[in-house]
Each structure stands twice: as C-alpha cells, then as structure tokens.
Image: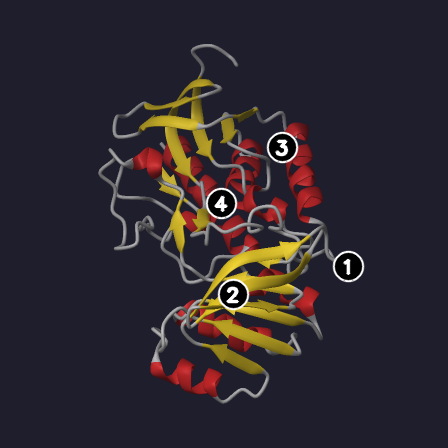
Amino acid sequence: MEENKLYDLIILGGGPAGATAALYGARAGLSVVVIEQMALGGEICATDRLDNFPAFPDGINGAEFGMLLQKQLENLEVPIYFGRIEKAMLEEDIKSVQTSAGEFTGKTALIATGTEPNLLNIEGELSLRGRGVSYCATCDAAFFRGKTIAVVGGGDAALEETIFLTRFAEKIYLIHRRDKFRGCTWLQDKVLNIPSVEILWNTTVSEIKGENKVNGIKIKQDGKDRDLAIDGIFIYAGRKPNAAFLENLDINCDDRGFIITSSKMETSVPGVYAAGDIRKTFLRQVITAAADGAIAATAVVQKLFTY
C-alpha cells in the first residue's frame, strides 16, 4: 500500500457497482482505490451462470465474470486491496477507512458493499449455495427449467418470485412457516390459483441435502418431519444491507437500513456516495448496480474537477 496517499475516491466494495465506478473514475483521471472483502465481482461470483448481462450470449460463470472485472481494473492500474472494513470515518472533509489491509484516506468515498440475504442457518445452506441454493430467481431461474424446486417465504418477494419461477420450473413447493401469507392480497390470489404451485403451510426447512448440488430438503410440517426431492431451493427470508461499519455514521437510510441517495448517488453526507444494492432502489441486479457505479464516479469527477 502506498503510504500516506490521499486518493480522490475510496471505493468500498468490489462488486459490479464498485468495479464500474473504479473503471469510470480511473478513465476520467481520478486516483481510485478499491477495497473488497472477498473477490472482485462480489456476490455474483457465487452464481453458477450470469445470463442476463449484455454481451454474453451464452452466459458467463459468475467467478469468471469477477475475474474479468479484476483484469479490467488491473489494466487501468487501479489498486485493489482485499480486507475487512473495520471502521469508516466519513463525515470529515478527508475520509478515512480502516481495514484489515491498512488505512486509506480520500477526498470522497463510495459505499458499494451490497447486501446479504438473511439465512435460514440450516445444514447444507452455505455448502450448496450457488449449486441449487439461490436467493435470486431473476439470476438463476433459467437453470431450473422443467425441474422441481422449493421457494421459502411468505412476503411479497417470495410470492413475486414464485410467480416468476413458474415460467421455468415444472413444480414448485411454496414453503411458509405460518398459516397465511404476509404478502399483498393480489399476489396471494395469483399464487393460490397456479396449478403447479403446492403450498406447504406451517412448514419450515430443517436441512438442505445434496453432495455437489441440491437433491432434496428435510422439512417439518405441522410438527412432523418429511423429506422432499427437489432440484433447487430459493430462499426469501429478506435481505439486509452490508453496513455494520456505518453504525456510527449519521446517514439517511430507509426503515430497512438501505441508504437514500440523489439521482447522482449522493448521500446525505457530503462527499459520500452510495451505489448498487446497498442503496434504496427499485431493482437490484448486476446491470443496475453497474449503472449506479458509473453515475457515482461521474458525479465525483464533476465535484472534484469542476472549478
């Protein structure tokens, strides 16, 4: 790490939003640094195949997509550091971020750390993630064409995604721990009238089974254990922003903790921007995250280079 370097832009998160912001920022002449905890590409790296991003007619493996992002930033000589964000002090004119990879300072900062799904915390969930365990129907539905799958949840997201998944799956078990849905009435009515959807009320999933991919689940229905043979499971227990490091920052968020921004991705804190899934937004997809990143970096260029 270059000691005592003051960057124009510190980017927290190396997913599609952060990587695109780095790309646009570097090409515009900003000094940029990217800090990522896991791998470039973020959560998409756990997806077996990305099929809904332009210019990949045959799709692309999520990990490969992440490696291409990293290669593109390396070609632009953008420094990338892998480490955990420990503390972010972003309210002063000079932003400071302490990480397990060192301390970084900058004139502006972009928060692009994304979200994480609320887990069921059951056996097999993590080990089979990306191999039949999914949290995004839009991302992965096409892999289950003609298959039998399960959807877990009872809110709007679970109902909406169940409707979407009927375009692909032959049979869907909709598993809900209560005896009625929490989602809006019109979604409930639609789901209740789909022949290929079997609703399992008062049911929880206790285990996800499989070696290299999901082949079944163990459920508890009305207090009784039962096994179901399935090819995949979509879990909608909600999502939360990856924002624990912001707990001491006075930044405007919605009631779920997602950051509120302007159309230029500006937050309520001067010089701090947010992009991608961590912000309050209508759609959370790779392409929209990338667009957010491009807008945020361009806004930073305008802020720093406009005299």
Label 3 and label 1: CA atoms lie apart by 24 Å
Which of the 4 quarters of the picture holds residue 272? top left
Please give the name of the residue rendered at 65% of the width and 41% of the height, measured from the top-left corner: 66
Under mark 3, the amino acid is: Leu
Under mark 1, the amino acid is: Asp
Q: Nearer the viewer, mark 3 or mark 1?
A: 1
For disc 3, the marked residue is 73
Please give the name of the residue rendered at 57% of the width and 37% of the height, measured from the top-left corner: 23
Under mark 4, the amino acid is: Gly
Is residue 218 among what the camera can see? yes
Say the numbered circle drawn on residue 293: 4
Label 2 and label 1: CA atoms lie apart by 36 Å
Reading the chain from its start, which is encountered first: label 3 or label 2? Answer: 3
Outermost residue on the left side: it is 250
Reading the chain from its start, which is encountered first: label 4 or label 2? Answer: 2
The reply, left or right, for residue 76 in relation to residue 225 is: right
Please give the name of the residue rendered at 45% of the width and 48% of the height, measured from the top-left corner: 116
Quadrant where the C terminus is found in the figure: top left
Whether the residues at callouts 4 and 3 have beta carbons within 8 Å, the answer is no
Under mark 2, the amino acid is: Ile
Q: Nearer the viewer, mark 3 or mark 2?
A: 2
Whether the residues at callouts 3 and 2 have beta carbons within 8 Å, the answer is no
Reading the chain from its start, which is encountered first: label 3 or label 1? Answer: 1
For disc 2, the marked residue is 219
Is residue 271 among what the camera can see? no
The colour style of the image is secondary structure
Q: Nearer the viewer, mark 1 or mark 4?
A: 1
The reply, left or right, for residue 157 in relation to residue 130 is: left
Q: From the viewer's perspective, is residue 138 above or below residue 187?
A: above
